[in-house]
Amino acid sequence: MRLGGVDLQRELNRLEEILLDSPRVPLSRRTLINEEQFLEQLDLVRLNLPSAFQEAAEIVVHKEDILQEAEQYAQEIIAAAEQRAAQILNDMGLVRQAEMEAVQIRQQVQRECDTIQQQTLADIDQMRRRAQQELDEMQRRALAECEEIQAGADDYADRVLQDMEQQLTEMMRVVRNGRQQLHSEPAAPKSLPRRSPESPARYPDYR
C-alpha cells in the first residue's frame, strides 16, 4: 500500500527488519535494538498515516460524484417518463395510467438512489474503521515492543549488577578471612636484653 509517495508496507517491513536484525541478549529471548533508528523508522510510518485519511476523503468526493451522476440519470429518467406520460395523455387520453407510471418510475429511481447512497456511506465508514483499527494495532505493537525491549534491558542490567554484587561479596569474604587470620596468629616473643658480666644479677625482693 503506497500512501503519499511512501510504500507503507515496505516501511513496516523495514521496521520489522530493524527488530529482527538487532543483537539478542545472551541466554535470553530479549533483543537490544538501536532505539534512535527504531524510533526514526516508527516516526516515518506515523507521519505518512494521515495520507490514508486524505485518500478516504478523496474516495468520499468520488462517491459524491457517483451520487450526482445517479441523481442526474434519475432526473433524465423522470423527464423521459413525464414526456412519455404527456405523450400518452395526448395520444390516448389515459391520464391516470400516465400518472401511475410516472409515480412508479420516480419511486424506483428514488429507491436506487437511496441504495447507492447507503452503500457509499457504508463503504466510507468501513474504510474509516479499518484505517483506525490499523493505526491502533500499529500503536499497540509499537508500545508492546518498546515495553519488551525495556524489560530486556532492565533484566540485563540486573544480571550485570548481580554478578558485580557476587564478586564484591566474594572479595569482602576474602578480606574478612585475611583479617581474622592476622588477629588469630600469636605475637612473636620479644627478646630479653643481654646482661653484661659486670652487672649484678637482679632478683626480685620477696621481703
Image (cartoon, helix red, strand yellow):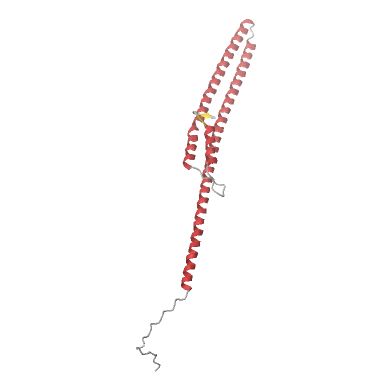
Residue 65 sits above or below residue 146 on the image? above
* Picture coordinates of residue 58, whole percent (x, y): 51, 25
The residue lying at 51 percent from left, 27 percent from top is: 55
Whether residue 194 sits left or right of residue 89 in the image: it is: left
Number of marks present in the image shown = 0
Question: Residue drawn at (55%, 20%), measured in percent from left and top?
Answer: 66
Return the residue nearer the eye: 159 or 180: 180
- 42 over 63 or under it: above or below: below
Q: Position of residue 108 (x, y in %)?
A: 62, 18
* Quadrant of the image containing the C terminus: bottom left
Instruction: Quadrant for the N terminus, please.
Output: top right
Q: Residue 16's x, y, as percent? A: 54, 38
Report the front residue among 8 and 34.
Answer: 34
| Percent x, y of residue 166 | 51, 59
Nearest the eye: 143 or 205:
205
Outermost bottom residue: 207
Q: Residue furthest top?
A: 91
The residue furthest left is 198
The residue at the point 47 percent across, 38 percent down is 40
Dividing the picture into quadrants, the one containing residue 88 is: top right
